[in-house]
């Protein structure tokens, strides 16, 4: 359905944890999964069963605890990985297989036909054991399109319900991504998901382009965690779906900041101040021109209302502040300054911000006000 919500498949617990140096404890995996579910994320890729008993136990705990979100096991396209997934108790798997000639040769020393045969065999194997199967095409962005269509047809014939197109090394641009998904949608009735990596900084743009092209599912990670440069960021995708793609998800935007902070703490990766949507400074304003406009109408310099995300805007006093910000800040502190005195305060604020390399606090502002009045 054209206007149906885009299904969000979060891979923070799988691909996100593959970011160098990131390792979640079982308790952290469960806490993140519960927070994802509370935020309204539809699907949670809970981990890789082939990693062993500890991972299987953690994934089983996630699956047993979730009540609304679907937990999914990520597997290679092998019988052994399917058997490991069965031990988690999860009912859904993503079976990944290389589809570019380069990866088929390097990883399997095989042929395209070997991949088709493997898909037919392993998908049927998983389906016979009661699992719902999505097929992931590793390195899809470097695959021959005619072969990719054969892969999708084989997956559908074997009983898969979805194909995940993976831009594994992050080489696509939004224009090509949109073109690809328009073509795929014209050739198959399978659900189509896009999984984008951020090597060129285009993972979010490519995911939105895939949605515009007909993708029904978006694979994301909180804060864009993932291998190398990471993946499309959950918070960016769900916030941008409406304004950019004219679509929506079931994710509660007001939950994004708490979710990001939880993941950042577990990953040991602080959130950058200017990180879109969830960064501590993304609704802070200092520039005098901006603040003057904002005080009259917030929409002059905010296309995103901070209230949508459970946030509030702040006006920071620093080198680029103007008179409007100084007067507004003093008024908020119960002071109604004369213009001449406010200009002296502004000079103090600007000079101090240069020396201190940080904003001026309310207490310091009052000190300046008192000092220039003496």
Image (cartoon, rainbow, N blue to C red):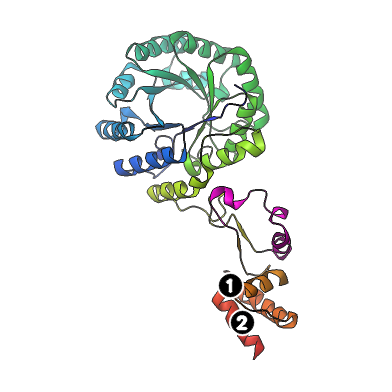
**CB under 8 Å between discs 2 and 1:** yes
Q: Which residue is mark 2?
A: 368
Q: Is residue 316 visible?
A: yes
Q: Is residue 344 left or right of residue 167?
A: right
Q: Position of residue 178 (x, y in %)?
A: 65, 26
- The quadrant of the image that shows the C terminus is bottom right
- 4 or 100, which is in the foreground? 4
Q: Is residue 97 above or below residue 45?
A: above
Q: Is residue 327 left or right of residue 82?
A: right
Instruction: Please check the rendered image and state whether residue 303 is part of the magenta-colored stretch, yes or no.
Output: yes
Of callouts 2 and 1, the N-terminal one: 1
Range of residues picked out in magenta: 287-313
Residue drawn 33% across the image and 20% down it: 82
Identify the image quadrant of residue 370: bottom right
Density class for disc 1 (Cα within 10 Å; few <14, some 14-19, many ≥20) is some
Q: Which residue is mark 1?
A: 360
Residue drawn 41% across the image and 49% down it: 262
Density class for disc 2 (Cα within 10 Å; few <14, some 14-19, many ≥20) is some
Q: Secondary structure at mark 2?
A: helix
Instruction: Please check the rendered image and state whether residue 237 is part of the magenta-colored stretch, yes or no.
Output: no
């Amino acid at each position: 359905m054209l206007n149906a919500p885009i299904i969000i498949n979060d891979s923070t617990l799988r691909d996100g944890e593959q970011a160098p140096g990131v390792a979640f404890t079982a308790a952290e995996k469960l806490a993140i999964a519960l927070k994802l579910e509370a935020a309204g994320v539809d699907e949670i890729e809970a981990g890789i069963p082939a990693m062993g008993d500890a991972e299987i136990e953690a994934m089983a705990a996630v699956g047993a605890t979730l009540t609304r979100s679907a937990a999914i096991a990520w597997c290679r396209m092998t019988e052994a990985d399917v058997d490991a997934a069965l031990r988690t108790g999860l009912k859904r798997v993503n079976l990944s297989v290389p589809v570019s000639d380069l990866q088929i040769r390097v990883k399997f020393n095989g042929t395209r036909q070997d991949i088709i045969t493997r898909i037919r065999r392993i998908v049927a194997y998983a389906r016979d054991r009661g699992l719902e199967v999505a097929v992931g095409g590793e390195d899809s962005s470097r695959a021959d399109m005619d072969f990719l269509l054969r892969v999708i047809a084989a997956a559908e014939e074997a009983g898969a319900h979805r194909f995940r197109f993976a831009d594994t090394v992050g080489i696509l641009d939004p224009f090509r991504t949109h073109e690809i998904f328009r073509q795929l949608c014209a050739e198959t009735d399978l659900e189509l998901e896009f999984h984008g990596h951020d090597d060129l900084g285009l993972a979010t743009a490519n995911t939105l382009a895939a949605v515009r092209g007909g993708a029904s599912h978006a694979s994301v990670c909180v804060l864009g965690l993932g291998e190398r440069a990471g993946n499309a960021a959950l918070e960016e995708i769900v916030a941008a779906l409406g304004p950019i793609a004219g679509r929506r998800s079931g994710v509660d935007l007001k939950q994004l900041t708490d979710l990001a902070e939880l993941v950042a703490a577990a990953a040991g990766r602080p959130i950058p101040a200017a990180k879109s949507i969830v960064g501590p400074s993304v609704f802070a304003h200092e520039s005098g021109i901006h603040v003057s406009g904002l005080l009259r109408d917030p929409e002059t310099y905010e296309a995103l209302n901070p209230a949508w995300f459970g946030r509030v805007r702040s006006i920071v006093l620093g080198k680029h502040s103007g008179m409007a910000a100084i007067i507004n800040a003093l008024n908020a502190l119960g002071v109604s300054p004369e213009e001449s005195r406010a200009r002296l305060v502004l000079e103090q604020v600007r000079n101090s911000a240069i020396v201190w390399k940080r904003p001026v606090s309310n207490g310091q502002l009052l000190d300046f006000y008192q000092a220039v009045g003496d």
